[in-house]
Amino acid sequence: MEVILAETAGFCMGVGLALKKLDKTVGEKENGDKINTLGPIIHNPQVLEHYRQQGVDVIDSPDDANSGDTVVIRAHGIPRTVEECLRNKDVKIHDATCPKVKKAQLLIAKQAAAGRTLLLFGEADHPEVRGLLSYANDDAIVFESLEELKNILKPGTAYFLAAQTTQDRKLFERIKKYLLETLPEAMPILETICDATQIRQQEAIEIARKVDKMVVAGGRNSGNTRRLVQVVEEQGTECFHVETADELRAEDFSSAKTVGLSAGASTPDTIIRSIYETLQSF
């Protein structure tokens, strides 16, 4: 069985920078120092366990940090009010927010200051989205589909459009086209979807079209990984979403001559390699 590995599989720039910052913080730790991440640094349970074994705890709120602790802000960013609360505490702060997410926050803040209402294409319960919303006005709207958007637009409202950085680029283009054709006034459109996300999705689509089956590796709570599964399945290709090689079963691939392998932006190379080698052994 031939296994085709996506060239884009593995850490994106933002994840790589966040983990590099956390590694540096851990490496400089002195006896007695306490390191926390405010929320999971990335959405991958195996990576989180690796850091837990190094003494890094995940906290849910600035209130959980003690005086003198080091707190690393997660790659997804945090809400503005939470960051303000954190900066008012006696803690050392290392901001590992992805630069693309930080840029999106600032772009949203600028449009909100002009009095516009945010239309945000994303998952309402995703930590990045909660952070982005905190830079918008209170009337901001989150939606996950074009159909949902069509039911919430109000005449006479000055909108602007943005997206969670890991969203589906093709769907975003359809949403953008609909809004430009529907709304009477020109509307600012913020291009906040990360280029790496777009390239990764496109490669997964191209591989899915020429293989019998597909495997996508990554955390089940990872939005960008779930999106990869979605775009693969839209090609009509059977897709297996796994976190580790242990979840693979040889019988699922017995009829396949070619299998594609891609991975989310928070999936370590060690896991990708393990899955690749396991597939080759079938």
Image: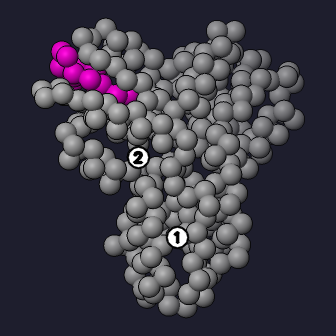
Q: Residues within 10 Å of mark 1 (few under 14, many from 20)?
A: many
Quadrant assignment for the N terminus: bottom right
Residue, disc 2: 43
What colour-coding does the image apply? one colour
**Considering only vertical position in the picture, is 52 above or below 192?**
below
Distance in Å between CA atoms under marks 1 and 2: 18 Å
Q: Quadrant of residue 249?
A: bottom left
243 vs 260, left or right, is left
Q: Which mark is residue 33?
A: none
The image position of residue 73, as x and y in percent, is 38, 28
Q: Quadrant of the C terminus?
A: bottom left
Q: Residue furthest bottom?
A: 255
Residue depicted at 64% across the width and 9% down the height: 113
Q: Secondary structure at mark 1?
A: strand
Residue at the image point whose x is 46% and y is 49% from the top: 266
Q: Quadrant of residue 90?
A: top left
Label 2 amino acid? Answer: His
Residue 56, relative to residue 157: is it above or below?
below
Residue 215 numbered mark, or none: 1
Is residue 144 visible in the rendered image? The answer is no
The reply to whether the magenta stretch includes residue 262 is no
Decide if residue 244 is on the left or right side of residue 233: left
The location of residue 153, given as percent across then percent down, is 71, 29
- Crowd rating for badge 2 (residues with CA inside 10 Å; few <14, some 14–19, many 20+): many
Q: Are marks 1 and 2 in contact (CB under 8 Å)?
A: no
Task: Tell me the magenta residue range.
Answer: 62-73
| 148 w.r.t. 98: above or below | below
Instruction: Determine whether, in the image, residue 81 is placed left or right of residue 150.
Output: left
Q: Nearer the viewer, residue 153 or 123?
A: 123
